[in-house]
């Protein structure tokens, strides 16, 4: 697990945008408005409005999907398939 600020700083240094999904209902996530793609600066402001956000850097080979939990400022690597978090992955990779 990693702190959200450190995680976002890491992605921002790589000059990447991220695909984002927000929790909707029934353990499912939907793409955030605008096609789901946000800059890191927009994602930072979005964190104030959602309790669970799944992000995946665009064109990333080294970073998988991560669940951002703003209430506790933590990032957890996850397997994200068809709009659902199917499992948590190796916590040492975040």
Image: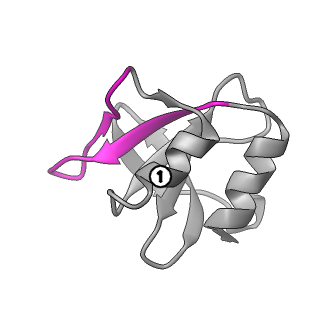
Which quadrant would the C terminus be assigned to in this image? bottom right
Residue 3 quadrant: bottom right
Number of disc labels: 1
Q: Extreme left residue here?
A: 26
Q: In the image shown, does 66 or 22 lie closer to the viewer?
A: 22
Residue 79, visible in the rendered structure: no
Q: Is residue 20 magenta?
A: yes
Can you give x and y, in whole percent of width and height, for residue 59 in the image? 71, 22
Q: Is residue 75 visible?
A: yes
Q: Residue at x 71, y 58 (%)?
A: 7
Q: Position of residue 80 (x, y in %)?
A: 46, 41
Choose between 94 and 43: the one closer to the eye.
43
Q: Quick one: which residue is furthest to the bottom in this view?
A: 72
User: Considering only vertical position in the picture, is 8 above or below 69?
Assistant: above
Q: Residue at x 75, y 44 (%)?
A: 11
The residue that appears at 32% across and 57% down in the rendered structure is: 49
Tell me the element at label 1: helix
**Which residue is located at x 65 percent, y 26 percent?**
58
**Is 64 or 87 nearer to us in this picture?**
64
Please state the extent of the stretch shown in magenta in the rendering: 17-34
Quadrant showing the N terminus: bottom right
Q: Is residue 54 above or below residue 72?
A: above
Residue 13: x and y in percent read: 84, 43
Q: Position of residue 8 (x, y in %)?
A: 68, 53
Q: Is residue 46 magenta?
A: no
Drawn side of residue 33 relative to residue 88, left or right: left
Determine whether 13 is above or below 70 in the image: above
- Which residue lies under the disc numbered 1? 45
Local packing at callout 1 (Cα closer than 10 Å; few below 14, some 14-19, many 20+) is few
In-image side of 19 versus 36 (left or right): right
């Amino acid at each position: 697990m990693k702190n959200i600020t450190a995680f976002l700083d890491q992605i921002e240094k790589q000059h990447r945008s991220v695909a984002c999904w927000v929790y909707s209902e029934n353990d499912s996530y939907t793409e955030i408005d605008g096609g789901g793609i946000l800059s890191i600066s927009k994602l930072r402001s979005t964190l104030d409005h959602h309790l669970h956000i799944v992000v995946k850097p665009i064109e990333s080979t080294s970073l998988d999907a991560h669940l951002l939990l703003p209430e506790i400022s933590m990032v957890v690597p996850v397997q994200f398939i068809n709009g659902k978090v199917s499992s948590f992955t190796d916590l040492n990779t975040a």
